[in-house]
Amino acid sequence: MSLETLKEIVLAGPRGFCAGVERAIDIVELALQVCPPPVYVRKEIVHNRNVVEALHEKGAIFVDELDEVPNGATVIFSAHGISPAVGEEARRRGLRVIDATCPLVTKVHLEAIRYAREGYSIILVGHADHDEVIGTTGEAPDKIHVIAHPDGVDKLDLPNPDKVAYLTQTTLSVDDTREVIEALRRRFPRIVGPSKNDICYATQNRQAAVKAVAGEVDVVLVIGAANSSNANRLREVSETTGTRAYLINDIREVKPEWLEGATRVGITAGASTPEVLVTEAVETLRRRDGEVREVHVVDEDVRFGLPRELEEIAQETGKTLPPRVAASSQGR
């Protein structure tokens, strides 16, 4: 990898793990400590291969659907949430469920339920094949219409144009959802939405940080999984500033021609990406006399408590959770 011209590495801050991801990973690790094995996890707990492989090595068994889980076993639902049908199947089969759904995703589910009960047609701005959107749509499949781009607004055929609500996938680009929502408001002037945008705080913060970094560098490397929505959006946000950006699982995927002639390289990471991959990238790229600088746009102090199921299982098995963890679980 040719780095002769590289003078500075600029890190975006914040980057990497958000509170919802940290919580989901903690849930799996703690479940492996207090639950009788085996412990199953439906879908990737978060969209990152390194995280999933690390948890698999510790004993977690990842499955695509519940029919791969034996009756009565323990199963963890991923951070992206589930549809009611999945929850009903788990109850019917007597599965011991630990729900790692991000609380911000749960908020969107509750909004969908409320709007559906009030008779609204619901426009869910998001990607139809994403696990989060699949789960949310399952709350009211006959009332929710999924669109990803402004041009999808004109194709909507709704029973009552005066009774329309919108929700958004939590990991989308803030700019992209703004365009779709503006198009929705033009077509449905009486449309209603949540009191606050559903785009999560971590998504907004990471997009603001990479936008700031992109304006100062020649190329941006976004470390994250190809199926990570928020990581893909970070690449797109950088490109909208006119700066080349590449999404990579780790530094080994970087092609030398991407960095040819670059004097400054920006690095950020998706909300499911471990910081160790950022450190590895910096160590690989940094020249002996090169500088590393962080552009930090906001501090994050969000922390989510853990589900009560973990405390209950720990009590049943005669095991104890760490004091700080146990205390946080009581707050939910």
Image (cartoon, rainbow, N blue to C red):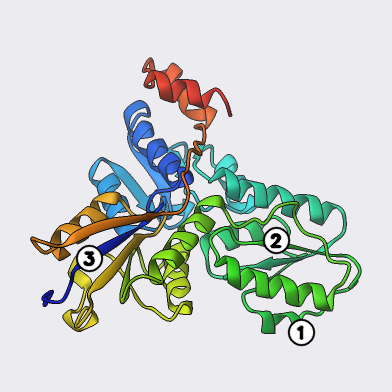
First in sequence, mark 1 or 2: give its number: 1
- Name the residue: 10% across, 61% down: 289
Residue 20 appears in view: yes
Between the residue at mark 3 and the residue at mark 1, the CA separation in whole angstroms equals: 46 Å
Q: Which residue is label 1 attached to?
A: 154
Task: Out of 32 and 245, give the one closest to the viewer.
Answer: 245
Mark 1: secondary structure = helix
Separation of marks 2 and 3 at Cα, in angstroms: 40 Å
**243 horizontally vs 10: left or right:** right
Q: Secondary structure at mark 2?
A: strand
- Residue 177 x/y as whole percent: 63, 69
Task: Name which residue type carries label 2.
Answer: Leu
Image quadrant in which you'd find residue 316: top left
What secondary structure is found at the residue carrying circle 3? strand
Query: How many residues crowd mark 3 within 10 Å: few (<14), some (14–19), many (20+)?
Result: many
Q: Position of residue 257 (x, y in %)?
A: 19, 84
Q: Amino acid at mark 1?
A: Asp
Indicate the quadrant containing the N terminus: top left, top right, bottom left or bottom right.
bottom left
Give the labeled residue for mark 2: 167
- Real-space CA distance between mark 1 and mark 2, rounded to the nearest whole angstrom: 17 Å
Residue 225's place in the image compared with 259, above or below, is above
Q: Which mark is residue 93?
A: none
Name which of mark 3 and mark 1 comes first in the sequence.
3
Q: Decide: marks 1, 2 in contact (CB < 8 A)?
A: no
Q: Position of residue 105 (x, y in %)?
A: 59, 50
The residue sitting at 18% across, 72% down in the picture is 6
In the image, residue 297 sits, relative to residue 191, either above or below, namely above
Q: Which of the 4 quarters of the picture holds residue 22?
A: top left
Question: Which residue does the numbered mark 3 point to in the structure image?
Answer: 8
